[in-house]
Amino acid sequence: MPEPIIPVQEDQIDFTAIRAQGAGGQNVNKVSSAIHLRYSIPDSSLPEEIKQRLLALCDQRITAEGVVVIKAQTTRSQEQNRQDAIERLQALVDSVAVLPKPRKATKPTRSSKLKRLDSKATRGQVKKLRGRVAGSEH
């Protein structure tokens, strides 16, 4: 895993062990190996602008109260599921930590304008040829 841009404090994360869903035989019914991670964005120690960007995300994992809920159940090991959940939370935080490059408005070049007009004229000629031929009667 790459180095996190803004590390998430593990003491601010609430973990709950739950039973995993799906196939897995008797193990699934007996062992609580899935992890439910809850991370409150407003109560976290993240910088304010990162909090605002996280809350502005249209992500189904973030509740209306600003709590990130991640369920990890891919492995049979509770510890591996816990690590997976932390990595996914860190990836979410890192995704908003990097500002997107501002877009610079540009104008089309003179040659691209001329090419566009040429192709429009050519297309118009093709369409004009599809019309009825004058003077020929069936």
Image (spheres, helix red, strand yellow):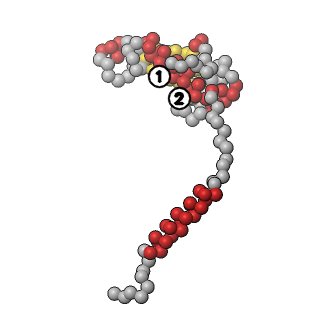
Under circle 2, the secondary element is: loop
Nearest the viewer among 15 and 131 is: 131
Which quadrant of the structure image shows residue 42? Answer: top right
Please tell me how crowded label 2 is: few (under 14), some (14-19), or many (20+) other residues with Cα within 10 Å: some
Numbered circle sitting on residue 10:
none
Q: Type of residue at label 2?
A: Arg
Which quadrant of the structure image shows residue 63? Answer: top right
Under circle 1, the secondary element is: strand
Does residue 37 appear in this view? no
Asked if labels 2 and 1 touch by Cβ distance under 8 angstroms, the answer is no
Q: Type of residue at label 1?
A: Lys
Does residue 82 appear in this view? yes
Residue beneath disc 2: 61
Image coordinates for residue 83, horizontal then vertical, percent: 48, 15
Image coordinates for residue 44, horizontal then vertical, percent: 64, 19
Q: CA distance from mark 1 to mark 2?
A: 9 Å
Nearest the viewer among 12 and 124 is: 124
Identified at 53% across, 68% down, the residue is: 121
Identified at 49% across, 72% down, the residue is: 125
Image coordinates for residue 21, horizontal then vertical, percent: 38, 22
Give left or right: position of 11 versus 20: right
Identified at 58% across, 19% down, the residue is: 4
Residue beneath disc 1: 71
Nearest the viewer among 131 and 87 is: 131
Image vertical order of residue 61 relative to residue 82, above or below = below
Nearest the viewer among 74 and 35 is: 74
Of the image marks 1 and 2, the number of the one nearer the N terminus: 2
